[in-house]
Image (spheres, rainbow, N blue to C red):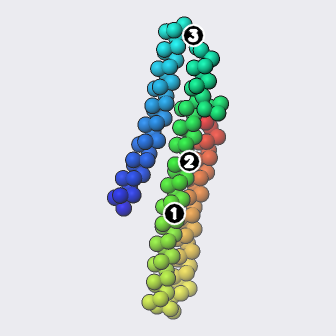
Amino acid sequence: MARITGFILIVLFLGLSGSVYAAVDSSKKNEASEVKGGNNDRDVEKEKVAGKTQEKVWSEIGVFFPIAIAAAFGTIGMGIVGAAAVKGVARNPGSKPGVQGVMILAMVFIESLAIYSLIISLMFYTKL
């Protein structure tokens, strides 16, 4: 679990540092162009990627990290719940209705967290 947490922190750090770097880099270019006496059209075109600034591209990428994390850990959680339910029913077949109800309820809660992260990420994406 510590390896997964470390990996997630590294990915988030790299994503955030890239967006900060893009913001600092674009502000340095703006300062340099002001010193030169104005914006050059070529500099503005280089700064954009498919009509978007680098800062906007990195912020769009950063918005979808929570969806990926929620989907990954949601599927891991569902696998653990399913495995535990199968083991419980295998040990005591008479407890199938109770175990099945609890398993379905747990899966609903896990999936709701993934859906909430999707909704929140889409809300942030529309505000970009």
Q: Residue at x 58, y 25 (%)?
A: 46
User: To which residue does mark 3 refer?
Assistant: 38
Q: Nearer the viewer, residue 49 or 117?
A: 49
The earlier-in-sequence mark between 2 and 1 is 2
Q: Is residue 2 left or right of residue 79?
A: left
The earlier-in-sequence mark between 2 and 3 is 3
> Disc 1 residue type?
Gly
Say the numbered circle drawn on residue 98.
Answer: none
Quadrant of res 105: bottom right
Q: Please identify, in this view, whether the residue under mark 2 or under mark 3 is nearer the observer.
A: 3
Residue 34: x and y, percent? 52, 11
Q: Residue at x 52, y 65 (%)?
A: 75
Q: Is residue 52 above or below residue 119?
A: above
> Disc 2 residue type?
Phe
The earlier-in-sequence mark between 1 and 3 is 3
Neighbour class for label 1 at 10 Å: few (<14), some, many (≥20)?
Answer: some
Quadrant including the C terminus: top right
Residue 18: x and y, percent? 46, 36
Q: Distance between the residues labelled 2 and 1?
A: 15 Å
Q: How far apart are marks 2 and 3 (CA)?
A: 36 Å
Asked if marks 2 and 1 touch (Cβ < 8 Å), the reply is: no
Residue 68: x and y, percent? 53, 54
Q: Distance between the residues labelled 1 and 3?
A: 51 Å
User: To which residue does mark 2 refer?
Assistant: 64
Give the mark count.
3
Q: Nearer the viewer, residue 63 or 33?
A: 33
Q: Which residue lies furthest to the top in this view?
A: 37
Q: Residue at x 43, y 37 (%)?
A: 17
Q: Residue at x 39, y 47 (%)?
A: 10
User: To which residue does mark 1 refer?
Assistant: 74
